[in-house]
Amino acid sequence: MQQHSDDARHPRHLRTVTGTLPVSAVRGPALAHEHLVLDLDRAGDGAAVLHAAPHGPAVTEELAQLREEYGLGLVVELTCRGMGRSPHALARISEESGVPVVAATGWYYEPFHPAELDGVGVEELTATLVREIHDGFGDTGIRPGVLGEIGSHGDVPSAAETRVLLASAHAAVATGLSVATHAQLGRGGRAQLELLTSAGLPPHRISLGHQDLLDAPTVHRELAASGAYVAFDTVGKESYQSDTTRLRLLLALVEAGHADRVLLSCDISRHAYLRSEGGQGYGHLFRSFLPRVRAAGVDEDLIDLMTRRNPLRFLTGTDPKES
């Protein structure tokens, strides 16, 4: 699984958990923000987890079915440091499902920060990320292909979150990767964008997460106009936001001419969301939401733009205006 040292800077290749993948090989839609293996259990009830065992087989089956039914071409897996990631499990799921997976490095928002962040400055955090990007996860030979999901909560990041955001930007600039954020309940996207760009990261290397949880079309247009990607990445999570509202917000952004800055996904982050447990599953975007988008008049070229070309351009740093 060892990958070429310069693949992160090559605009025509992706780093996946099973090796370097030509962009041209991704011919179907991508899920731009997902979790395949994860542990965010702070309550001790085992709800906010997706463990390699026993949940891995169900995850694998869902992805394989989506590849068969909808041509699923890529999953961007944003489980980072302190979130219970497992590179070996990701590689196994990818190999068995036949769906390429891009893994991540970085840190989530402050309530989930591991002890390794305590009292550590931006320069040292940057070095930690750059080292993992270059050398991989331990001795696995698997290397991250994106920084994410880099988290903050509230309208302004905390001091610790600010250090992480700045370190992520510096590491992205140094290595050629892009940054995907977690903006808790959609808030704080403007502040995240300002911090990341202040460190020299171009807006088109930034995806601002969970914007479909923020009912603020003006903010969405502002973020998209800056050149950043606006992630509608919790599709199907009705307890947070209805898909009817998501659809309205998405259509407003598309009608404003910003379809080239949209990323779509479902952010499956606990086992109850799996179809085997009665949840909406990774395929909710394709089975339920996109048919509604089409019915609202969005054509297939724009669907392909939002679900395939945009994620690839985000990951590789190829600006939509240039391709």
Image: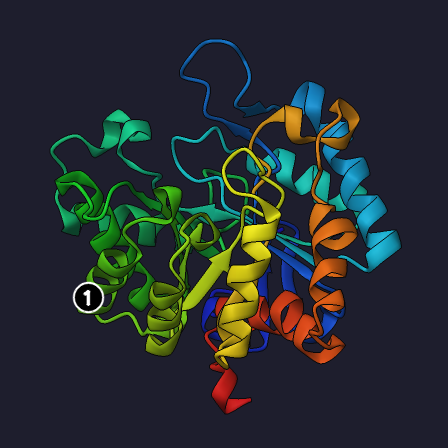
- Report x, y in % for residue 193: 27, 63
User: Left of 52 or right of it: where is 143?
Assistant: left
- Report x, y in % for residue 31: 63, 54
Rendered view: 77 above or below 221: above
Look at the numbered disc 1 and give the secondary structure of its residue: loop
Residue with the most extreme bottom position? 322
Which of these two is toward me, 75 or 231?
231
Which of these two is toward me, 11 or 276?
276
Q: Name the residue under label 1.
A: 199
Three-letter amino acid code at disc 1?
Ala
User: Left of 288 or right of it: where is 18?
Assistant: left
- Report x, y in % for residue 259: 55, 75
Which quadrant of the structure image shows residue 47? top right
- Report x, y in % for residue 107: 34, 41
Q: Quadrant of the C terminus?
A: bottom right
User: Left of 80 or right of it: where is 218?
Assistant: left
Rendered view: 57 above or below 9: above
| Disc 1 residue crowd, few under 14, some 14–19, many 20+, Cα 10 Å | some
Rendered view: 218 above or below 113: below
Q: Does residue 290 appear in this view?
A: yes
